[in-house]
Image: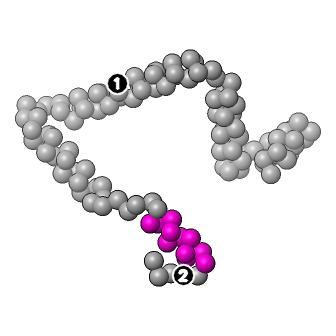
């Protein structure tokens, strides 16, 4: 379907403009653009980009931590609050993927016992 849409872009730009606005098509085109960019990138460029991405993430995280600790002198209290929020949000137990996959495959065959 995507190949047909890309072919349409060359042969009938007006029709392509109408179809390209669909969210699923726009997302696929964006993913293809990212894939092309990735395929055109050599190892050194990729490592440099990943390093830059990590540095940006760490900087954002440090700013976030600074905001969280702003206006308080009791770091232990802030850490306890962060832990409380994390524990109230995150699951206590993470369901192993292989068990879920076995249950899904069995359910696809009509066996809902797992």
Quadrant (top left/top right/bottom left/bottom right) for the C terminus:
bottom left
Residue that carries the numbered disc 2 in the rendered image = 111
Q: Is residue 101 magenta?
A: yes
Where is residue 29 drawn, in percent x and y? 71, 40
* Disc 1 from disc 2: Cα separation: 50 Å
Q: Is residue 34 above or below residue 51?
A: below
Callout 2 crowding tier (Cα within 10 Å): few <14, some 14–19, many ≥20: few
Q: Is residue 14 above or below residue 73?
A: below
Span of residues in magenta: 99-109
- Helix, strand or loop: magenta stretch: helix
Residue at image coords 30%, 61%: 93
Q: Is residue 92 above or below residue 84?
A: below
Q: Nearer the viewer, residue 77 or 19?
A: 77
Q: Nearer the viewer, mark 1 or mark 2?
A: 2
Residue that carries the numbered disc 1 in the rendered image = 59
Check disc 2 and report its element: helix, strand or loop: loop
Q: Which mark is residue 32?
A: none
- In the shown orientation, is residue 5 left or right of residue 73? right
Q: Quadrant of residue 10?
A: top right
């Amino acid at each position: 379907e995507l190949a047909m849409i890309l072919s349409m872009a060359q042969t009938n730009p007006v029709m392509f403009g109408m179809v390209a606005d669909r969210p699923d098509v726009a997302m696929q085109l964006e993913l293809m653009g990212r894939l092309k960019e990735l395929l055109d990138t050599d190892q050194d460029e990729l490592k440099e980009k990943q390093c830059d991405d990590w540095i940006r993430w760490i900087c954002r995280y440090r700013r976030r931590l600074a905001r969280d600790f702003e206006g308080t002198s009791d770091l232990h209290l802030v850490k306890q609050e962060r832990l409380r929020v994390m524990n109230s949000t995150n699951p206590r137990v993470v369901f192993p993927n292989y068990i879920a996959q076995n249950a899904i495959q069995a359910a696809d065959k009509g066996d809902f016992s797992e």
